[in-house]
Image (spheres, rainbow, N blue to C red):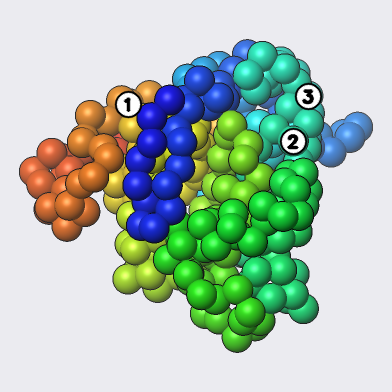
Amino acid sequence: MYSSEIGEATEAVDVSRAGSVRLDDVTHRYGRGGEVFTAVGPVDLTVRAGEFLVLVGASGCGKSTLLRLIAGFERPTHGSVRVSGTEPRPGEAAGVVFQTPRLFPWRTVGGNIDLALRYAAIERARRPERRAELLARVGLEGTEKRRVWEISGGQQQRVAIARALAAEKPLLLLDEPFAALDALTRERLQEDVRRVTDRTGRTTVFVTHSADEAVFLGSRIVVLSRSPGTVALDLPIGLPRGDVDAEELRGSPEFTELRAQVSHAVKSAAAA
Ligand code: ADP
Ligand code: MG
């Protein structure tokens, strides 16, 4: 255990609590009878504790399906999914961030976080401090009393990320969370997510179809083939992590080269 400073918040990092994911020969089909459609698989994949895995692939290749299987929202038609050795239960295995924030619009920002803290069984007396910490971590300090409809789409997505972190799950799953945001907001949030997950040591699985986003975020990238998705490329990313200058990183020759490599892999996997 060690402590790291995050803005004003200080958090103890315990990587031993980070989750692992194991997919063994996983195939998932939708429908019944003559209308069966194979959405993904077969996929074998292990995500080690503390890894930041990015799943990339063309639209419809099964990325969201894989994420839902890991979250425990669905059970695979074939094969097995394990999170830290056990079958994932919905709402218990992981904190999840979707493409649209899915907040409670009639609640305040603080109220949305409070609800997650309550579900996470954080005592009432500890909640205000924890809430302030979480909001500070996503750059929303002092917004507790604002209504969800009063803040921008980017801010709403920040609240959704804070809410997913509030759950204190050993695994964080994000499904194209920045797809609907403008480029500048998107880059800022990418930087936040990278920093937050590095500092909390959480295992993260992030879905995107952007090679650029994948290379910036991932410590490892898995490219899926076209539907039904299978692993087409499994690439470790050796770019520096922790406190990095994001501009410098994005401008580096290593970054540019990896982005080209991933982009090429995604295109050829989609065409194959
Ligand atoms: P991606 O996230 O990569 O775009 P999805 O996992 O959402 O892909 O979908 C993979 C395939 O499975 C798509 O062809 C999609 O239409 C189909 N699919 C997804 N969810 C369902 C569902 N609930 N019922 C039937 N088909 C589905
Ligand atoms: Mg999807």
Residues at badges 1 and 3 in contact (C-beta under 8 Å)? no
- SS class, disc 2: loop
Indicate the position of residue 132 as horizontal and vertical percent values: 55, 62
Q: Looking at the figure, which quarter contains the N terminus?
A: top left
User: Which residue, as the protein is rendered here, is positioned at the far front?
Assistant: 125
What residue lies at 23% left-to-right and 29% top-to-bottom?
238
Q: Is residue 161 above or below residue 12?
A: below
Sort mark 1 into few (<14), some (14-19) or many (20+) by Cα contacts within 10 Å. some
Q: Is residue 175 left or right of residue 235?
A: right
- Local packing at callout 3 (Cα closer than 10 Å; few below 14, some 14-19, many 20+) is few
Q: Amino acid at mark 1?
A: Leu
Q: CA distance from mark 2 to mark 3?
A: 21 Å
Whichever of callouts 2 and 3 sits on the residue coming sooner in the sequence is 3
- Say whether residue 58 is left or right of residue 235: right
The residue sitting at 66% across, 14% down in the picture is: 85
Disc 2 marks a residue whose amino acid type is Glu
Residue 160 seen: no
Residue ID for mark 2: 92
Counting the numbered discs, the total is 3
Q: Quadrant of residue 271?
A: top left
Would you name the residue on which mark 3 appears? Answer: 77
Looking at the image, can residue 185 be seen?
A: yes
Q: Position of residue 84 (x, y in %)?
A: 63, 19
Q: CA distance from mark 1 to mark 3?
A: 27 Å
Q: Nearer the viewer, residue 262 or 150?
A: 150
